[in-house]
Amino acid sequence: MLSKTIQDALNEQIKNEIQSAYLYLAMAQHCESKNLPGSAKWLTMQWQEELEHSQKLIGHMNDREGRVVLGAIDKPQTEWASPLALFKDVLAHEQKVTALINSLYALAIKENDYATQIELQWFIKEQIEEEKNATMVIDQLTMLGETGTPLFMLDRQLGMRAK
């Protein structure tokens, strides 16, 4: 059974994961509006992943007799000055999520909640991948540029993402 402290913190993280999904959906739609279908696909897959993350936490809470209480999410940003600015926001957002997961893990340690610690280890590994992927796109945009053929080629590569 979950302590009230852990339950409240997990409910907050579920809200954060859904907020992340909402942000990625807004980013995907921005890319669609800029004729960047590959970037839109990449971000749509991020949207789906974030929803899966929230469902993973919901499952953990249900398995542990917790009570899921969904919180309100904020309207996401909908415009970015450039693809590089957008992907820099992706990285900054993922770094924020990493900090939230790390804080939640520290709380699980403090509460001696070993099952939640194990569950959160998956999220910690996932955040390493998320930050790495965003950094790679930023590096490529910085190196290649954000216009013409290099942007077209990178967008096309992003659209080939399978999972």
Image: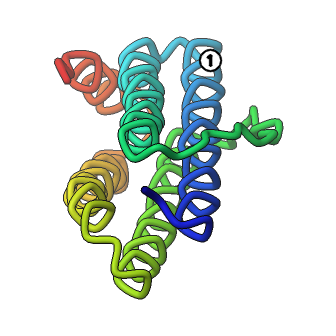
Q: Is residue 25 visible?
A: yes
121 vs 93, nearest the viewer = 121
108 vs 93, nearest the viewer = 108
Give residue 106's position: percent from left, percent from top.
Answer: 40, 82
Give residue 93's position: percent from left, percent from top.
Answer: 54, 57
Q: Is residue 140 visible?
A: no
Q: Quadrant of the rendered structure where residue 120 is?
A: bottom left
**Residue found 25% across the figure and 24% down from its top:** 153
Give residue 38's position: percent from left, percent from top.
Answer: 36, 17
131 vs 140, nearest the viewer = 131
Q: Quadrant of the N terminus?
A: bottom left
Give residue 147's position: percent from left, percent from top.
Answer: 45, 33
Mark 1: few/some/many CA within 10 Å (<14, 14-19, 20+): many
Judging by the rendered image, the residue that carries numbered circle 1 is 29
The amino acid type of the residue labelled 1 equals Gln
Q: Quadrant of the C terminus?
A: top left
Is 37 drawn above or below residue 21 in the view shown? above
**Residue found 39% across the figure and 75% down from its top:** 108
Is 131 drawn above or below residue 109 in the view shown? above
Query: Could you say whether the residue bearing mark 1 is in a helix, strand or loop?
Result: helix
